[in-house]
Amino acid sequence: MRRCVIQCGALLVAVITACDPWFGTQYRQALAPTPRLDCIATALRTSAVVDRVSPLRRGDYGTGKDEGFWIALRDTAGLGIPRATVTLASAPEVAGHVTVTYVYMGYDQISLAQRQYWAALAHQLLGTIRTACAPNSPQAVECHGTGAIGGQRGACRGAA
């Protein structure tokens, strides 16, 4: 029995440590009418904070059937910016939602200053997309933490 407990414990440790604990912080805005992808691409390419835009393949980093773009942002504050995506939701219940998602490893220590910086960039990007593609949409932006079990605690604290 003792041997089984040790083996099961070792197996559990191996399974847990083999996973990449990725997390994300998402900033989402509902736009109406639903913007076209080419409008979003143009808005991103003309944004002062975007360095590069490339197409996102369906399913990249858990995006499911959503379509969008990988973006590289200019880090003018020198605080570090993780990989980011901008996606247009495909599910009927969230049609028209555009989301900016920052993807990072769970063991990264993200400071409050970084969270506030990422939030400011996300709000700026969503504002650029809203102005170009759906100017009559409300300005409200929601923040959500994602990844692991139940999302990362505090992902939006002080940054929404």
Image (tube, rainbow, N blue to C red):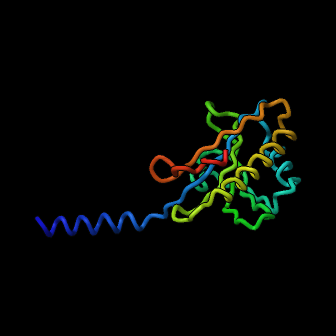
The part of the image, by quadrant, that contains residue 75 is bottom right
Pick the front one: 155 or 34 = 155
Pick the front one: 56 or 48 = 48
Residue 104 to residue 158: above or below: below
Q: Quadrant of the C terminus?
A: top right
Pick the front one: 49 or 158 = 158
Left or right of 122 in this view: 20: left
Number of numbered discs visible in the structure rendering = 0
Left or right of 54 in this view: 2: left
Q: Residue at x 52, y 61 (%)?
A: 106
Q: Residue at x 70, y 62 (%)?
A: 81
Left or right of 132 in this view: 141: left
Q: Residue at x 70, y 49 (%)?
A: 100
Q: Quadrant of the N terminus?
A: bottom left
The part of the image, by quadrant, that contains residue 115 is bottom right
Pick the front one: 98 or 144 = 144
**Picture coordinates of residue 29 (x, y %)?**
71, 38
Q: Residue at x 77, y 61 (%)?
A: 73
**Picture coordinates of residue 137 (x, y %)?**
79, 31
The part of the image, by quadrant, that contains residue 60 is bottom right
**Picture coordinates of residue 61 (x, y %)?**
59, 56
**Picture coordinates of residue 43 (x, y %)?**
85, 48
